[in-house]
Image (cartoon, rainbow, N blue to C red):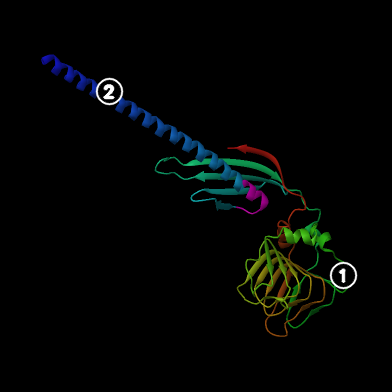
Amino acid sequence: MAALKNKKGFILISAYMIVSVLIILATAFSARSIGEKRVADKERDTIQALWLAEAGLDRAIAELPNTPLSGTLGTGLAYSTQTTALTASMYLITSTGGVPSTAVNPDNAIRKVSAIIERPLNPASSGDIISAITASGDVEVKGSAQVNGTIDEENAVFNFEDVFGISKEAMKNGATHSYTDPANNITPVDHTTWVDINSLTEMKITETGWSGNGILVVDGNLNITGGTFSGIIWVIGTLRVSGNPVIDGAIFVESGAEVDTTLTGNPTINYDSGTIGDAFNFIPSSSAPYLVNWKED
């Protein structure tokens, strides 16, 4: 009887030992599994961060020379870019992608890439624009309107592609903003803006506080009675300017242009070679940018 009790005690102790060993093994296996999952999650986040940095780089190339840029791709997944002009045609772009920390994976995953991009220059030169207003028809300056610069009018010979180095189609396709029959005082109008007037009589800019810059191309009539603009305005139609707007740069009109102050105000048009040169920086390139060098920082 005593031997049987001893045997039962031995079995119980053995069972405890086996259970203890199994618990230790299960704990070790669980810890290893958690560790391996964290490593896998970290690797996944690191790869995602690189993809985000590459996505930012692609966008920065497509939107040269705009800077800085930022964006998100999914919850918390973000990129940011910075573009620096090295020469007139070459740019350094730095793009950073990041995946945020989580309770399971407390470390942020960040990858950074940089690239040197060359964008071929357009053959046209801003220095070839020497007049405040160039029009194929008559230009009538009335009242107190001021045009500070020369007026080249009535059968003036000028061509869109000769001025900008690209076709109208290329300018339209590469425009930063494109509008069709826009509301009055449409914004934004910056970098390159293309406006098609189909059902409306004209595009209207009337507010004193309105402002625009870069290159504005209006395929239709344009009526400006307020606001300010710095850059180049190209009208494929009729231009009317009245009120008290201020335009710095140059104007091209493929029909009669009338600067009219018979209503109210004192419009001012200033020829500005510096502003014209700045506008030329936004001309879409006729040749695609290409990669010169790439590295991960």
**Is the residue marked by circle 1 packed among few (<14), some (14-19), or many (20+) residues within 10 Å?**
some
Q: Relative to the observer, which residue lies in front, 221 or 47?
A: 47
The location of residue 17, given as percent across then percent down, is 25, 22
Asked if the residue at tag 2 contacts the one at tag 1, i.e. Cβ–Cβ closer than 8 Å, the answer is no
Considering the numbered disc 1 on the image, is that residue within a helix, a strand or a loop?
loop
Name the residue furthest top: 3
Q: Is residue 69 magenta?
A: no
- Residues shaded magenta: 57-67
Considering the numbered disc 2 on the image, is that residue within a helix, a strand or a loop?
helix
Q: Amino acid at mark 2?
A: Ile
Name the residue furthest front: 1
Picture quadrant where residue 177 is located: bottom right
Q: Amino acid at mark 1?
A: Ala
> Position of 226 compared to 104: left or right?
right
Question: In this figure, which residue is indicated by the disc labeled 2?
Answer: 18
Question: In this figure, which residue is indicated by the disc labeled 1?
Answer: 156
The location of residue 186, given as percent across then percent down, is 64, 71
